[in-house]
Image: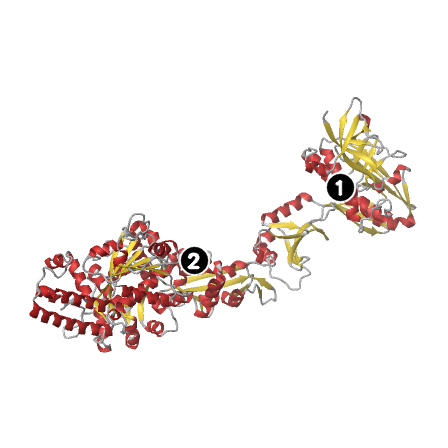
Amino acid sequence: MAQEFIIALTEHRAVGNIFVPMLIEEERSYFTVKKTVKLRDYKSGEVGLNESELELLKLIENYSDENLVKKFSKKKEPNFFQNLDADLFQNHISPFIDKYMYRCILLLMKGKTRLFSKQAKYSSLYNEDVIQINQSFSESVFHFYRNENGTRYRLKISHEGTPVEILHKTLRMVTTLPCCFVYLNKLYIFNKLSGKKIVPFLSKESVWIPRQAEDKYYKSFVLNTIKESEVKATGFEIVESSPPRKTILSLEQDLALRPTIIVKFRYDNSLYLADAVSDVFVSLEMKHDNYSFRKFVRNHEWEEEQLAMLKKLDLKYKNGFWNPKDNDETDNYYSPVLWLSKNRETLEKQGFLIQQNKLDKKYYTGTQILDIQIKSDEDWFDIYAIVKFGSFQIPFIRLRKHILNGIREFELPSGEIAVLPLEWFSSYREIFPFAKTDGNILKLKKHHFLLLQDNVKGIDRNYFYKLEEINTSFANPVELPNDLKAELRNYQKEGFSWMYHLYENQLGGCLADDMGLGKTLQTLTLLLKIKKAKSQIVVPKKDDQLQFSLFDQPEAGAPLQPASLIVMPTSLIHNWENEIRKFAPSLKVYKHVGGLRNKSNKMAQTIGYYDVILTTYGTMRNDAEMLRSFDFWYLILDESQNIKNSSSKTYKSILEIRSKHKLVITGTPIENSLSDLWSQLNFLNKGLLGSLPYFKREFITPIEKKNDEEQQKKLQKLIHPFVLRRKKEEVAKDLPAMTEQIRYCEMTEDQKEIYDTEKSAIRNAILKNIESNGLKKSALVVLQGLTKLRQLANHPSLVSKESEMESGKFNEIYRNLKNLLAENHKVLIFSSFVKHLELLQAKIESKNWKYSMLTGKTMNRQEVIRQFQEDPDNHIFLISLKAGGVGLNLTSADYVFIIDPWWNPAAENQAINRAHRIGQDKKVFVYRFITEDSIEEKIQILKSRKSALAEKFIGSNNPIDGINEEEIMSLFS
């Protein structure tokens, strides 16, 4: 049989009439109670309920015996109900139960759940026990009659217009406030009437109030009755009115002493909280011994419209207070004040009144308008900013300390406290550290354009039209110069366009591509492009003496241009010279190096005539006093990490050299610390990253010690337009499978001196041997002489273990190796001489770098190979050509160094194929290190020529076989 969920009205042994949820089952003429339902029955799945039934169950559970004891008994007394205190019951427990029972009644009015009357001792119910639930509220009218002796009043009750007589009738009171009772198996429900006011009329028709008791009665009972019920009065007046009304937003303190908004409604002179329960307000006044009541009903429709407007403006209600919703947690304290400031104009137009009460300070809640105007010149943005606090106009510069120190409260001349919007702090805190002040004007360098663009709302985009091209360089390519003798790859064209847009905006940039991606070529493309844009300078007269480069002679009458100065490590001079000769031969180049370089009396003409001046960091330091007296067009630093130490003489010297434009080139802008980056970018765009102490405080410490991601993002935003870094993997699609380059290395002075001495001695010895024994029998002497010169060109220590001389090539190999490690690449280093590898090994170990080494002496060959291939921290593999030329698969490496190339390329190619072979998923770069002005360079020249001598020398196992005396001696010239 189907079971029905019902509510039974039964009498509790201690608290009177209560509702109890039950399951009943219909028999033939009655119903059997199967179960009293508890909330746990539903939760366990034993009983299934619909939404309305579940809500009834939850409401009734609130006044279960267990919950009443828990709520009202401090000691959880076992005999709580037997010893129930009358005062506790009357004033606390009964109203508590009434509240939940009345809510049940409201649900029963709308639902289909049946209500039965049940006696506790019976387990059966009958149809006549069903209580009919009225679907509407019953009405009550009090009739008051006042005369000179006193006041009499009666109560009339009706339902849907039909009188309900209660005199001498038995009513079953279900709830007291509001009143609900059962009469003749009907449940009568009142909206406001108190059950206590019904009780007298069960036994008498009227109640008499004598004259002497009227005053107290009228001020309490009559006044409350007029509030709660309909009243008909004779002998005194009840005036119903619609008084003028106003919504008041009162800025006060909440329970935590924070500013908050309390919404109040003012009807005439009476003030009521928006969340007040009462609907009707009644006041009493005496008029010539007559009582006069003034009554008005709250206009809920108007109040809801007012509150809806506040909600539309993002104000929300909680626990008696109104606050802006979706606040940033850090802004919660001041959000009500700022909300009033932001919306005051709108609120006042809609008729709201704003007040402040019970605060220890008076906040300014008017409008706050930040008016910004910007003008720009060649180098600066001038920012004219005024904050308008109502009638007060405050220069924004006066808020600088507040913004930088996070002080939200600013005192106005009136003494009011204006709360500065949080967005001003997030936006302008980034600008103030970099801005200079000029009276009430903020001056910001043009290289900080992104700070303005990202943080200042409503700014004219025209200010940034040209500057935005820096960020969109890839989408706005620049036409390549016609006299460039090279085909640029796509990423190189993008790099050139980026540099050119920086040039147009007179901003410095750092080209920080991976080693081997053509940073020099991109820079030469820029120098060719700007050559036509530079001012023209008169050519020097023929009698003016200039030191010309070996591959450039001036043409009389040719237009002259200001020179660009390129500073680099000594080892790169030759490479720059070769790259210019190969790719940009139209550039006139002067090498400002060596003891014969021009001094101050000739330097002006040199700068005036040449396009490019190449010099070294050492020469620049020595000639700083002379160089700083000239103006260069571009000042370019290659391997710019050389100026990473801002306290070094190199850094200080380079800052003294004047130029219109600046550029730095490096594969490793950060070697040890972010301070390396600061030094280079401060050279490029002075003040870009603030002072060094500021940079340490704001960026180095938070990022390096705390890994602060927010500061990392801010730093990236600051430097983004001025640093272009492409890793090899990012541009792999534009690269060939293998790229080969030659790195020319200059000998140190001591090395050059011993080399030239030995070369002369070897040449004389060979001539003497040929003269004595003939050419064929002198082959061994020739080979010995070639090997010794080759060793000296690589490192003097290869010839003499005791030698403490430095090697220019060794220093260049180390410099490139350090750059590759900084870029996280793996490299194979091949040499014909094990001793050469051991010299590198000693250097590597002194730096505590991980490495592997494979020579003829290596016993655990496979283990050494595995360690290099699989260990991500092992970046260096030293390999002798004989031991590692064949049989190796080393595809984890993407760079190959051939540190002492020789005549037969076959062995070198085998070495290169250790990395560049099937299974290699990376692009491979091969570097051959060749000492200039040495036997190595002569052999390289032979390799590049398709001459008869080259064929004889390069293609033979015995390079001496088949060549004559004159050809041999040319190698030693």
Tag of residue 453: 2
Quarter of the view holding residue 576 = bottom left
Q: Residue at x 61, y 48 (%)?
A: 311
Q: Secondary structure at mark 2?
A: helix
Quarter of the view holding residue 25 = top right
- Position of residue 492 measured from the top left corner of the image (x, y, whole percent): 29, 55
Total numbered badges shown on the rendered structure:
2
Q: Nearer the viewer, residue 933 or 651?
A: 933
Report if residue 666 is visible in the image.
no
Look at the image and tell me in which quarter the C terminus lies. bottom left
Q: Residue at x 77, y 42 (%)?
A: 63
Q: Nearer the viewer, residue 630 or 418?
A: 630
User: Looking at the picture, which amino acid does disc 1 mark?
Assistant: Tyr
- Position of residue 716 measured from the top left corner of the image (x, y, whole percent): 42, 59
Q: Secondary structure at mark 1?
A: helix
Q: Nearer the viewer, residue 576 or 92?
A: 576
Q: Is residue 821 left or right of residue 174?
A: left
What crowding class fits label 2: few (fewer than 14 Cα within 10 Å), some (14-19), or many (20 or more)? Answer: some
Q: Is residue 684 left or right of residue 115?
A: left
Q: Earlier in the sequence, mark 2 or mark 1?
A: 1
Q: Nearer the viewer, residue 827 or 343?
A: 827
Tag of residue 253: none
Q: Residue at x 17, y 58 (%)?
A: 944
Report if residue 358 is visible in the image.
yes
Circle 1 residue: 100
Look at the image and tell me in which quarter the N terminus lies. top right
Quarter of the view holding residue 582 = bottom left
Q: How is the image coloured?
A: secondary structure
Instruction: Determine whether 170 is above or below 274 in the image.
Output: above
> Spatial distance from mark 2 to mark 1, Cα to Cα?
60 Å
Instruction: Determine whether 190 is above or below 424 in the image.
Output: above
User: Looking at the picture, which amino acid does disc 2 mark?
Assistant: Gln
